[in-house]
């Protein structure tokens, strides 16, 4: 049983014991929807970040971890078409980190990101942890009654869109795994930066561990164009930008029939959306907006840009479907971020296919999965 199987079993149990008529949507979407008062519905979402599962502490400065802890939940509210308003965060820290400046840097990054979207921290919890850093992020948002965009509304003939570009966060993770690190010059320029105590300044963009094999061919080159690409990809992994603006526009203007954020990967999240809507999908590989920095670096590192775009998670872009008559009303850009039309919804439930040049192949969900079946 993987995480999605178990969630489905919990969903079935929760439906049997629902005790409140105010629950409009419970388990199974990016956020729960509760009837709040006439004209407004409440959105609630929660996310866990576990050290060495969801992030590597050695590669993640605490201010960027604070940013990401909030970003992953803001993305869920965006995927429902809502406006984020309030947040809560619970933090478990080993004692040595508590005694350090970790918590102050974490919340500096958290508050800087919260202020960007007018989100107020209203509570949470703190605990000592003996198993690394544990973060529980909760965000509450609001949407006009009946306007929340669920995963279950896609219909055959709907057009499929994705915001921004794909594959960058997964490429950033691969760079981290071979030893790439952000240098202090980059960190110093970011909102919420707090000077790291006990660490000498390093103006290099990418810090490489001294213990690495000097003969390794995976160490990044330091010409300016490649260095800039490495910086961008690392930041896409460590400091994601949730598409809050797009989510609010889509929700307010009723532009989407279904929506989900791309956290597990396009292949997996499109599969989630299709299963909830009981439909299939046909997408075109040439239309998938692969990040330009991924394309630039992959040729030098024997990585497949299309594979990263299809299966790499944590891009936190929005994947949504729109009826043909609504397509003309879609903005070209929101907050500077464009959208790409990647395919259509079909009437073949559970069947997702990719058109690549002259052939069609089945797309299997291969994004990240906790407790993956053995």
Image (cartoon, rainbow, N blue to C red):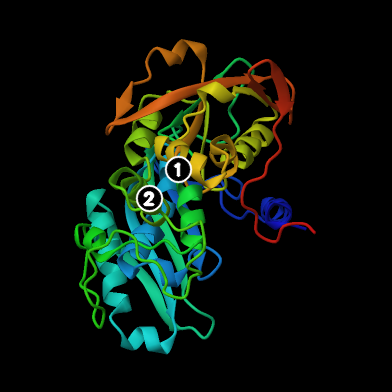
Q: In terms of image quadrants, where is residue 128?
A: bottom left
Label 1 SS: helix
Residue 19 figure quarter:
bottom right
Quadrant where the image shows the C terminus: bottom right
| Badge 1 vs badge 2, beta-carbon distance below 8 Å | yes
Q: Mark 2 sits on what residue?
A: 230
Residue 204 vertical position relative to residue 16 in the rendered view, above or below: below
Image coords of residue 270 (percent x, y): 61, 35
Mark linked to residue 4: none
Name the residue at 50% across, 30% down: 320
Along the viewing direction, whichever of 180 and 153 lies nearer the viewer: 180
What residue does disc 1 label?
Answer: 297
Residue name at image x 36 percent, y 54 percent: 239
- Residue drawn at (57%, 38%) of the image: 266
Q: Residue at x 38, y 52 (%)?
A: 221
Decide if residue 361 is on the left or right side of residue 152: right
Q: Position of residue 180 (x, y in %)?
A: 42, 61
Q: How many numbered discs sit on the rendered protein?
A: 2
| Quadrant in which the N terminus is drawn | bottom right
- Whether residue 202 can be seen here: yes
Instruction: Identify the element where label 2 is drawn.
Output: helix
Q: At which x and y percent is residue 227?
A: 33, 50
Dot 2 alpha-carbon crowd within 10 angstroms: few under 14, some 14 to 19, many 20 or more? many
Residue 267 is left or right of residue 226, and the answer is right
Query: Mark 1 or 2 closer to N-term?
Result: 2
In the image, is residue 43 above or below residue 48? above
Question: Which residue is farthest front?
Answer: 215
**C-alpha gap between disc 1 and disc 2:** 8 Å
Determine whether 112 is above or below 334 in the image.
Answer: below
């Amino acid at each position: 049983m993987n995480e999605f199987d178990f969630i489905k079993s919990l969903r079935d149990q929760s439906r049997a014991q629902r005790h409140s008529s105010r629950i409009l949507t419970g388990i199974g979407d990016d956020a729960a929807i509760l009837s709040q008062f006439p004209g407004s519905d409440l959105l609630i979402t929660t996310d866990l970040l576990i050290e060495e599962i969801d992030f590597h502490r050695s590669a993640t400065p605490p201010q960027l971890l604070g940013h990401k802890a909030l970003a992953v939940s803001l993305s869920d509210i965006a995927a429902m078409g809502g406006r984020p308003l309030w947040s809560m965060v619970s933090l478990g820290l080993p004692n040595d980190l508590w005694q350090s400046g970790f918590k102050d840097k974490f919340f500096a990054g958290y508050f800087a990101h919260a202020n960007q979207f007018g989100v107020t921290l209203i509570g949470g919890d703190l605990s000592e942890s003996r198993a690394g850093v544990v973060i529980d992020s909760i965000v509450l948002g609001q949407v006009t009654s009946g306007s929340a965009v669920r995963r279950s509304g896609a219909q055959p003939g709907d057009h499929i869109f994705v915001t921004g570009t794909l594959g960058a966060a997964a490429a950033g993770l691969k760079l981290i795994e071979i030893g790439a690190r952000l240098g202090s010059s980059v960190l110093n320029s970011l909102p919420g930066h707090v000077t790291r105590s006990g660490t000498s300044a390093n103006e290099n963009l990418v810090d490489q561990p001294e213990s690495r094999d000097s003969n390794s061919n995976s160490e990044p080159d330091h010409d300016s164009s490649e260095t800039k690409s490495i910086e961008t990809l690392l930041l896409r992994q460590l400091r994601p930008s949730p598409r809050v603006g797009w989510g609010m526009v889509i929700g307010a203007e009723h532009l989407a029939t279904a929506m989900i954020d791309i956290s597990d990967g396009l292949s997996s999240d499109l599969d989630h959306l299709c299963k909830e809507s009981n439909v299939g999908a046909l997408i075109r590989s040439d239309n998938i907006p692969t990040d330009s920095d991924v394309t630039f670096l992959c040729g030098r590192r024997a990585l497949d840009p299309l594979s990263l775009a299809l299966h790499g998670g944590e891009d936190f872009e929005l994947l949504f479907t729109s009826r043909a008559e609504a397509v003309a009303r879609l903005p070209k850009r929101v907050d500077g971020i464009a959208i790409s039309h990647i395919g259509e919804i079909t009437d073949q439930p559970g069947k997702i296919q990719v058109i690549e040049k002259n052939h069609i192949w089945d797309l299997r969900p291969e994004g990240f999965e906790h407790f993956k079946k053995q």
